[in-house]
Structures are given as structure tokens and as C-alpha cells.
Amino acid sequence: MQEPNKYLATRLRTLRKERGWSLDRCAGETGVSKAMLGQIERGESSPTIATLWKIAGGFHTSLSDFLEPTPAPHPGPLYRQADTLRRQPAGDGILVAPLFPFEDRFGFEMLELTLLPGYERRSDPHDSGVIEHVIVQRGEMELLLEGRWQPLVPGTAVRFHADRPHGYRNPGPTPAVFYNLIHYPARKPDT
């Protein structure tokens, strides 16, 4: 498997060129500075998860699209191990394991996310029609929905429209681990 920063650099450059975007246009679409995008493309910067989400949103694609290649179609069971996939973008307070990266044929990605103590992330709305499913596996966390932080404990499952502001935080002293299945509406071909 390719080293994460090299894969990210290659994927960002490839998507930008496929769309015919300059770095200026890419910065305008993603809300990430031209300088930062250039550093990412050159493999000189490891962006935070918040920056990766902005880039994914600007390209109207999944987060996992920037974490690792889409798996090749597999006729039988596909086994993945979170311990071998887990990484911490830019030393951020969140660990991400792309358990099942996005594939068009399924329409979703499934991530294991670990919120370290004190971590808080407010997410901008995703594209229209994106739905998130959060299932708390270990620890306690809070989910920001409709302007209010909702406490969640292990075993709690929540489904919500992610095309609205939302957020995640861990106000406690131990890591909180949850699964996040993100469903994307069928993509329309670019016109």
C-alpha cells in the first residue's frame, strides 16, 4: 500500500487535473488555501481531518477517497483490520480507520473514528442528501445535532442528515470510539 501522504498528494493532483482546475479554482471550491493545497500536492504537508473534509466536500466526493484507493471488486468476503488502517492525520485529536472506503456500487463509506480526550470537531454541512450513521462502540462522546450537543454512550446508534451543521466531541478523560457509516446519494455524471 502507498504511504498515506504520497497517496493523498497523487489523488488530489489527479482529481484536480481531471476537472481542469487550477490551484486557484481548487482553493475556491474547497475553502482551503492555494498554498496549503500546493503543499499537500507536493507531499510537504499532512492536513488535519477538518482540511481533508473540506477538500472532499469541494470535490463532492467521500473522505475515504483521499485516504486510500477504492478496493478492487472482490467476489468473496473482504476482511479489514482497523488496527492496521488507523492513522492520525496531522497529529489531530482524531484517529481514522477507513474500514470500507467509498465504492459507487454500494454508495457508502464506513469509518472507525477515535476521538481523543478533549477533541471537538464541528463539521460543515456535506452535500445535499448525505446521511450519517453513528454507532458508539467504546467510551462516551457528544454529537452536535440541531444546535445541541447530545450525549452518547456505548451501544447508542444515531442516523441523521449530514447536509446540515453537525459535530463530534469527547469531553471525557478516555478515548471515544465510534463507527461512522456515511451514505452518499447516487452521483450524477458531470455535465
Image: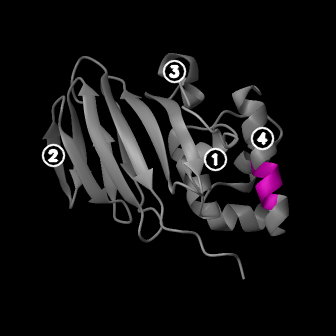
Quadrant where the C terminus sits is bottom right
Amino acid on which disc 1 is placed: Asp
Q: Which mark is residue 13?
A: none
Residue 11 point in image, percent of width and height: 76, 46
Judged by depth in the image, the label closer to the viewer, 3 or 2, is 3
Amino acid on which disc 2 is placed: Gln
Tell me which corner region of the image, top left, top right, bottom left or bottom right, holds residue 112.
top left
Amino acid at the residue labelled 4 = Ala
Lower sequence index among marks 3 and 1: 1
The answer to whether 162 is drawn above or below residue 100 in the figure is: below
Q: Nearer the viewer, mark 2 or mark 1?
A: 1
Mark sitting earlier along the chain (1/4): 4
Q: CB of mark 1 within 8 Å of CB of mark 4? A: no
* N-term mark: 3 or 2: 3
- Label the magenta part by its dominant secondary structure: helix
**Label 3: element kind:** loop
Q: Residue furthest bottom?
A: 191
**In which quadrant of the rendered view does residue 166 lie?**
bottom left
